[in-house]
Image (cartoon, rainbow, N blue to C red):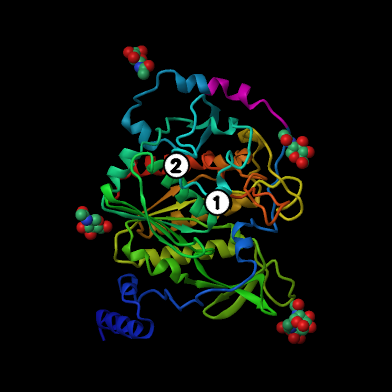
């Protein structure tokens, strides 16, 4: 039997079983990319809670105390504000956008509560009572070039007629929400789809025929929560070699996929491969191989990339690297907080931390699959965001029912999260993939 016949037979078979006509375009018999139907919904009283909870088992360690960052960056600002309009094209192209510093600029944010009506209350820090607004003034300056200001018109013209999805957890949705605000300064989008949990969301920009969506996936791969006596346990069974259908079924319809994840892995995880238990993370069983958290993250991205590689559809894939939480003096549930009012210096960032390790794993997997031929880019935001402990909602997240907890995981809007979209536009401009 020829490869081709085998392939179409398996497509037929799977179509009949699962009714997934879209899947066939990503099928490849040479790979063992699986797509077992995940259970549709894991009921748990903790769902909303977990949605907004950071990882319970890690806190970011932050060295050093108060520093006059203003002083430190004075020089940088002068550098930027002086004439540096047109660097040679070549230099701009090779410059590492993600290596740089925050500098104090007088430029305000791109949008406000009144110019962007879609800011979620939980991230609308000023509306929730945050008084210090200085965190809005810091701009990112790559060492060797300029990061262009976000221009919504340029962006919308570039993505005319396309579909873009943010695939990942609630921090991924945070990224999408920032882009939505930035673009709505140019054209008001229509809200065309929302599920009851606000996990899948679709917006349409009619003048530009552009669809923007967020596709919820905690792990990129299949992860099912164990229930104990009918309630969620926050313990997950992970299928390291099975991608999450929630995004995988939609993938062939996309033009751009911005992929991320990380926070949900900081839990007790049981790891399965080919339906066999092969190890665990943070578990106590003596007879199971214990892995560090970077292992399941590596395998999750590897499986997701393998699936994307095997898809016939040309999709521009970007990875947004891990954006760390900033709990100080405790974890999210033990009184940790994040009330800084200015960024940290690069020297204060801990490159021995697990957050940086997670980022390195993600970059390694990007490089690995790029060598194998997948068109993939990265938004390497980790180090820039490690410096922004001042950019989280903290106590200002309009949280009435769980008073006492801080949100040091998601990002204020407007706020430093908007730089992710400056990066996005810059990367798409450099490499016009589509
Ligand atoms: C940049 O410098 C050149 C020459 O020094 C000057 O003619 C030009 O107006 C400057 N541009 C800006 C934006 O300052
Ligand atoms: C809008 O974009 C879709 C692809 O996303 C394309 O099929 C359709 O023809 C476009 N419509 C118009 C009016 O350009
Ligand atoms: C589950 O419920 C049973 C009966 O109420 C109880 O004995 C058991 O300890 C519970 N298990 C856990 C893990 O809470
Ligand atoms: C652990 O390994 C020991 C020795 O091989 C065996 O006797 C025991 O049953 C195992 N326990 C579990 C939980 O698999
Ligand atoms: C941050 O919060 C802690 C604990 O509530 C407090 O001790 C500290 O003074 C606060 N720092 C600032 C800069 O508000």
285 is higher (above) or lower (below) than 13: above
Label 1: how many Cα within 10 Å (few below 14, some 14–19, many 20+): many
The numbered disc on residue 395 is none
Give the CA distance from mark 2 to mark 1. Answer: 26 Å
64 is higher (above) or lower (below) than 311: above
Instruction: Quadrant for residue 432, please give it.
Output: top left
Say what secondary structure mark 2 lies in: loop
Which of the two residues, 271 or 209, is positioned nearer the viewer here?
209
341 is higher (above) or lower (below) than 197: above
Instruction: Quadrant for residue 281, please give it.
Output: bottom right
As for residue 46 lying within the magenta part, the answer is: no
Identify the residue under disc 1. Answer: 322
Residue bounds of the magenta highlight: 66-76
Identify the residue under disc 2. Answer: 116
Q: Residue 226: image x %, image y %?
A: 64, 76
Q: Are dots 2 and 1 in contact, CB under 8 Å?
A: no
The N terminus sits in image quarter = bottom left
Secondary structure mostly seen in the magenta stretch:
helix
Q: Residue 142: image x %, image y %?
A: 47, 33
Identified at 63% across, 39% down, the residue is: 129
């Amino acid at each position: 039997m020829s490869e081709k016949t085998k392939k179409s037979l398996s497509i037929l078979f799977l179509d009949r079983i699962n009714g997934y006509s879209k899947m066939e375009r990503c099928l490849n018999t040479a790979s063992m990319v699986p797509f077992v139907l995940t259970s549709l919904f894991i009921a748990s009283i903790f769902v909303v809670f977990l949605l907004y909870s950071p990882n319970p088992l890690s806190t970011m360690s932050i060295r050093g105390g108060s520093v006059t960052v203003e002083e430190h960056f004075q020089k940088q600002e002068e550098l930027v504000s002086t004439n540096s309009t047109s660097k040679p094209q070549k230099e701009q192209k090779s410059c590492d956008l993600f290596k740089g510093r925050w500098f104090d600029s007088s430029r305000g944010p791109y949008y406000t509560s009144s110019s962007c009506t879609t800011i979620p209350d939980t991230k609308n820090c000023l509306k929730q009572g945050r008084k210090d607004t200085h965190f809005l003034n810091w701009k990112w300056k790559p060492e060797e070039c300029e990061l262009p200001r976000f221009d919504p018109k340029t962006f919308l013209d570039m993505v005319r007629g396309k579909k873009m999805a943010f695939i990942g957890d609630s921090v991924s949705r945070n990224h999408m929400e920032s882009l939505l605000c930035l673009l709505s300064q140019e054209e008001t989008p229509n809200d065309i789809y929302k599920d009851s949990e606000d996990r899948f969301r679709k917006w349409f920009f009619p003048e530009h025929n552009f669809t923007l969506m967020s596709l919820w996936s905690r792990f990129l791969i299949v992860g099912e929560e164990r229930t104990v006596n009918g309630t969620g346990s926050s313990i997950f069974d992970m299928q390291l070699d099975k991608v999450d259908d929630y995004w995988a079924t939609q993938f062939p319809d996309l033009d751009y996929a911005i992929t991320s994840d990380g926070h949900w892995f900081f839990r007790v995880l049981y790891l399965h491969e080919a339906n066999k238990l092969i190890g665990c993370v943070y578990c106590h069983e003596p007879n199971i191989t214990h892995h560090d958290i970077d292992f399941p993250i590596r395998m999750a991205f590897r499986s997701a990339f393998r699936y994307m590689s095997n898809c016939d559809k040309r999709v521009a894939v970007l990875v947004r690297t891990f954006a760390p939480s900033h709990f100080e003096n405790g974890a999210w549930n033990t009184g940790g907080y994040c009330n800084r009012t200015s960024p940290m210096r690069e020297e204060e960032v801990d490159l021995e931390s697990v957050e940086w390790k997670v980022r390195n794993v993600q970059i390694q997997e990007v490089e690995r699959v790029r060598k194998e031929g997948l068109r993939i880019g990265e938004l390497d935001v980790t180090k820039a965001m490690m410096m922004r402990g001042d950019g989280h909602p903290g106590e200002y997240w309009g949280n009435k029912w769980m008073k006492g907890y801080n949100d040091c995981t998601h990002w204020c809007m407007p706020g430093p999260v908007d730089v992710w979209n400056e990066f996005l536009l810059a990367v798409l401009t450099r490499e016009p993939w589509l």
